[in-house]
Amino acid sequence: MQEVGTFCLQIGFSYLATVAFGICTNVPRRALNACGLTGAAGWIVYWVLFQFHLGRMLPNLLGAFVIALVSLFFARRNKIPVIIFNIPGLVPLVPGGLAYQAVRAFVLGQYLNGIQYAIQVAMIAGALAIGFMLAQFVGNSRLLHWHR
């Protein structure tokens, strides 16, 4: 039962974080719910895969892939540019904590730790970019067509 509660908390807070960022970046009001669902979908994919001890790269890649596919769906459905859903949806996956640790390590003179954290941040950013790129290939192909 505790796992169900944790799962619901993960969905709820990722939804709220995405909607809050959408509000801060002036996403149209009619797109806020879809933005929240986009971010929650990507975070849940990341979180479930991370629970299976798959590291950080694959869960981030697949989370970004799901965010991009869901963004394409909502963009076509609502006739809104896809970036309106992509950017807020990406917020839960951004490795801000690791980037902070990298900067902190450099400031404290722990250069090897700082480099290690910075490399992890770069690899996660690369995984996010590859996930978005793969989703664009799939979304633009004839494999996925959403018609209204």
Image (tube, grey):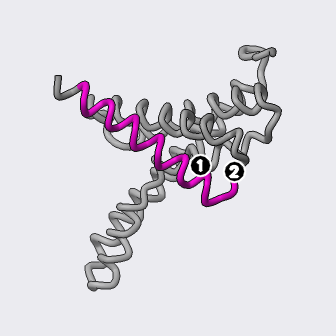
Amino acid type of the residue that numbered disc 1 sits on in the rendered structure = Pro
Residue beneath the point at 53% across and 53% down: 20
Residue beneath the point at 32% across and 77% down: 104
The residue tagged 2 is 27
Amino acid type of the residue that numbered disc 2 sits on in the rendered structure = Val
Residue beneath the point at 49% across and 31% down: 41
The residue tagged 1 is 88
Q: Is residue 41 above or below residue 85?
A: above
Q: Position of residue 145 (x, y in %)?
A: 77, 16
Q: Is residue 65 left or right of residue 103?
A: right
Q: Main secondary structure of the magenta part?
A: helix
Q: Position of residue 32 (x, y in %)?
A: 63, 42
Q: Nearer the viewer, residue 9 or 101?
A: 9
Q: Quadrant of the C terminus?
A: top right
Q: Is residue 64 above or below residue 5?
A: below
Q: Is residue 114 left or right of residue 146?
A: left
Q: Is residue 62 visible?
A: no
Q: Is residue 136 left or right of residue 5?
A: right
Q: Which span is picked out in magenta?
A: 4-27
